[in-house]
Image (cartoon, helix red, strand yellow):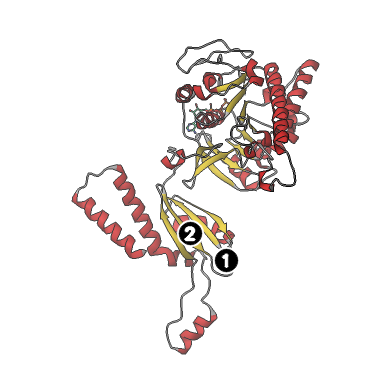
């Protein structure tokens, strides 16, 4: 492999010297090849210096002594695979006996300096095998999603880039409900906009609750099946969703028809087990600024708030099997918002925290998951808007940043896919665009929720 890399770099360098003016992809390839070469040439000595080698086996030492040969060197992890990427390279390593994935993770900063890379992260693939991702520059400074990210699976949206150069997906089937926190102007709305843009071409119904007078979601109304911009409308909309969830459960029950001759695999447990012609459209419910739904000033508002929180908790507890997924955004989401909030938070497995102003806000996202993620969230610099920490209840977390999608771009994409907007009869009163109108038609009055479409 080393010989191949040397030959490749020599060829590229020779061609480069012959014709200095080359396109960007040429210099990218040249840079990556140099990085590959640097890593391969220095690999043994760097691993030794970073404490990632083990002494040679005793039989090797004995053999060397009896044959009067030089003593064998300490052994670094074996390179199983080396893969150049757009942003650097990925090394797949087989650990030596006595080493563990934590050794590599703990040495990642030393590896970064030794290989002259911008960032080094590691992750365990399986027992004894670790992948080390190296990036040559700050990939989060100007986020460019790789073309491969477009190959999305159903209900899996490529929403951001991770600091190791890989794509961060929001996979609704793996993690049904998620919470996104962040101080004002930290990038929550842009992140949510990227989700809508990613979901727009899919067979999914989008439902929005935007109590910031609808400024974030209403311009995207053509791709939404239902929208609410006041807590009153939100309460009714959530009740309608709970009723839809009950109907879907009934449908699943009807389709189960369990008899002794039905094989186990064919018994439907959620909408994805149903035959395609019967499967109800999955629904993603996006809530912008959740605190607006939980605050109250009078007894009547308190009753409405309890109704909203109860509906959200029920959707979070039971929605997955019925294909109803929650995406909740807010500045803070803690017990100060009243009863039921921590119960709801416990159901939101996916966690994303943009810049927060204090440790307690970071704790609301990661306090029950990972102390390291809390620290990383409060260290996000104010000038890096859009930078966030994404984690889940397994304790794993990543630094991510979504591409900067403007509202105009999002509106254009939603309008282009307006014909995909499913018409859900239960949510018809909340439909912002009159059914039957194509994507080319002009703005129309909204249903219960009132605002303008773009
Ligand atoms: N991923 C990103 N890349 C580059 N710039 C970003 C990114 N995300 C946000 N920004 C910048 O930060 C500004 C604020 O972002 P955004 O409106 O999403 O914040 P917010 O957290 O929703 O704020 P608020 O809670 O006040 O609505 C945007 O106008 C944009 O200029």
Towards the viewer: 306 or 261: 261
Task: Tell me: residue 80, above or below residue 317.
Answer: below
- Which label was assigned to residue 178? none
Dot 2 beta carbon under 8 Å from ligand 1: no
Residue 370 appears at what percent x and percent y?
65, 47
Task: Tell me: residue 52, above or below residue 213.
Answer: below
Q: Nearer the viewer, mark 2 or mark 1?
A: 2
Q: At x 56% / y 36%, what residue is drawn?
A: 155
Towards the viewer: 237 or 117: 237
| Gap in angstroms between the C-alphas marked 2 and 1 | 15 Å
In the displayed image of the protein, which residue is found farthest to the left?
A: 18
Secondary structure state at the residue bearing disc 2: strand
- Residue 142 lies left or right of residue 275; in this view the side is left
Residue 9 appears at what percent x and percent y?
29, 57
Task: Tell me: residue 189, above or below residue 134.
Answer: above
Q: At x 74% / y 43%, what residue is drawn?
A: 259
Is residue 291 visible in the rendered structure shown here?
yes
Quadrant hosting residue 113: bottom left
- Which label was assigned to residue 92? 2
Quadrant of the snapshot with the N terminus = bottom left
Residue 379 appears at what percent x and percent y?
57, 41
Dot 1 beta carbon under 8 Å from ligand 1: no
Is residue 115 visible in the rendered structure shown here?
no
Quadrant hosting residue 97: bottom right
- Residue 361 lies left or right of residue 125; in this view the side is right
Count of all numbered marks drawn on residues in the image: 2
- The 10 Å Cα crowd at callout 2, few under 14, some 14 to 19, many 20 or more, is many
Residue 360 appears at what percent x and percent y?
68, 37
In the displayed image of the protein, which residue is found farthest to the right?
A: 299
- Residue 205 lies left or right of residue 111; in this view the side is right
- Residue named by callout 1: 99
């Amino acid at each position: 492999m080393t010989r191949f890399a040397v030959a490749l770099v020599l060829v590229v360098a020779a061609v480069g010297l012959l014709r200095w003016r080359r396109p960007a992809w040429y210099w990218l390839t040249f840079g990556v090849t140099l990085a590959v070469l640097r890593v391969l040439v220095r690999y043994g000595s760097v691993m030794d210096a970073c404490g990632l080698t083990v002494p040679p086996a005793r039989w090797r030492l004995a053999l060397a002594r009896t044959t009067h040969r030089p003593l064998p060197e300490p052994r670094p992890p074996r390179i199983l695979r080396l893969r150049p990427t757009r942003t650097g390279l990925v090394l797949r390593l087989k650990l030596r006996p006595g080493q563990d994935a934590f050794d590599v993770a703990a040495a990642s900063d030393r590896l970064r300096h030794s290989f002259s890379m911008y960032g080094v992260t590691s992750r365990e693939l399986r027992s004894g095998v670790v992948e080390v991702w190296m990036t040559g520059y700050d990939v989060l400074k100007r986020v460019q999603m790789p073309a491969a990210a477009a190959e999305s699976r159903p209900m899996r949206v490529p929403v951001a880039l991770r600091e190791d150069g890989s794509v961060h997906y929001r996979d609704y089937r793996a993690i049904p409900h998620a919470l996104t926190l962040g101080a004002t102007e930290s990038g929550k709305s842009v992140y949510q906009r990227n989700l809508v843009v990613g979901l727009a071409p899919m067979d999914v119904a989008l439902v929005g609750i935007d109590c910031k007078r609808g400024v974030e979601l209403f311009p995207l109304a053509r791709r939404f099946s239902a929208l609410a911009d006041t807590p009153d409308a939100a309460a009714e909309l959530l009740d309608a969703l709970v009723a839809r969830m009950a109907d879907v459960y009934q449908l699943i029950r009807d389709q189960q028809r369990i008899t002794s001759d039905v094989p186990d695999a064919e018994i439907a447990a959620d909408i994805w087990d149903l035959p395609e012609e019967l499967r109800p459209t999955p629904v993603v419910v996006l809530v912008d600024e959740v605190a607006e739904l939980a605050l109250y000033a009078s007894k009547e508002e308190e009753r409405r708030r309890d109704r909203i929180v109860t509906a959200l908790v029920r959707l979070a507890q039971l929605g997955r099997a019925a294909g109803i997924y929650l995406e909740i955004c807010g500045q803070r989401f803690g017990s100060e918002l009243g009863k039921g909030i921590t119960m709801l938070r416990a159901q939101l497995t996916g966690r994303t925290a943009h810049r927060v102003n204090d440790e307690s806000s970071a704790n609301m996202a990661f306090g029950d998951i990972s102390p390291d993620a809390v620290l990383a969230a409060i260290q996000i610099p104010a000038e890096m808007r859009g930078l966030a920490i994404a984690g889940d209840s397994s304790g794993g977390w990543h630094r991510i940043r979504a591409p900067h999608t403007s509202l105009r771009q999002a509106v254009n994409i939603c309008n282009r896919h307006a014909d995909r907007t499913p018409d859900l009869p239960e949510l018809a009163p909340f439909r912002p665009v009159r059914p039957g109108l194509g994507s080319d038609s002009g703005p129309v009055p909204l249903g219960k929720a009132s605002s303008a479409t773009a």
